[in-house]
Image (tube, grey):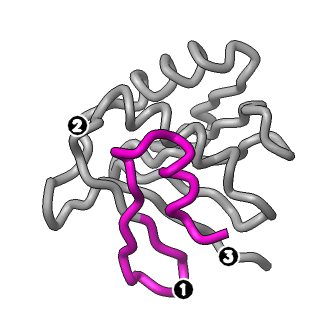
Amino acid sequence: MGSSFYVSADREHAGPWAFTGEQVQEIVLRHWPDATVSSAYEGFLEIVADTGADRPAELSFNRRHGVFGFEDRGSPAGPLTVIYEVVHELAPEVPVVWWIDYDVDLQPLDLTGGREAFIGSFPA
């Protein structure tokens, strides 16, 4: 069983993101009209989008806690592309952090340098 990564606002320094699941869905479908955004699991959005990365992005958004999550399945570029576009549009001034499921040592992600810097600030 693989690990999972999580991405959220840096709550310690900025509080939670103020956007809604509906806003996340709207942005995902605007950028990737063929994407699937499902709310089959209560409190979660399940997102599958072909972002042009080596495989479709598969990730979730926890509506209650404002946290994106995705599994460690090769390159994180697809899920991080979706997360970047959502956060860049809805909360560009809010610092972003990530962590892995077995270690809650929060690490920053660079939202200010553009999408490539954002993806590049995540260890491959």
Residue placed under numbered mark 1 in the picture: 102
Question: Where is residue 106 drawn, in percent x and y?
Answer: 36, 75
User: In the figure, 91 relative to 26: above or below?
Assistant: below
Question: Residue 15 lies in what quarter of the image?
Answer: bottom left
Mark 3–mark 1 distance (CA, rounded to whole Å): 8 Å
**Are discs 3 and 1 less than 8 Å apart at CB?**
yes
Which of the two discs, 3 and 1, labels the residue nearer the N terminus? Answer: 3
Q: Please report the residue visible at 58 percent of the width from the left and 48 percent of the height from the top.
A: 80
Quick one: SS at disc 3?
loop
- Quarter of the figure with the C terminus: bottom right
Q: Please report the residue visible at 68 percent of the width from the left and 50 percent of the height from the top.
A: 77
For residue 66, side relative to residue 95 (left or right): right
- The amino acid at mark 3 is Ser
Mark 2–mark 1 distance (CA, rounded to whole Å): 27 Å
- In the rendered structure, find residue 18 and report the number of the disc placed on it: 2
Residue placed under numbered mark 3 in the picture: 3
Q: Please report the residue visible at 38 percent of the width from the left and 33 percent of the height from the top.
A: 88
- Specify whether residue 105 is painted magenta: yes
- The amino acid at mark 1 is Tyr
- Which residues lie in the magenta part? 98-124
The one nearer the camera, 105 or 3, is 105
Question: Where is residue 1 drawn, in percent x and y?
Answer: 79, 79
Mark 3–mark 2 distance (CA, rounded to whole Å): 27 Å
Question: Where is residue 18 drawn, in percent x and y?
Answer: 22, 37
Which of the two discs, 2 and 1, labels the residue nearer the N terminus? Answer: 2
Q: Please report the residue visible at 79 percent of the width from the left and 63 percent of the height from the top.
A: 73
- Badge 2 local density, few (<14 within 10 Å), some, or many (20+)? few
Quick one: SS at disc 1?
loop
Which of the two discs, 3 and 2, labels the residue nearer the N terminus? Answer: 3
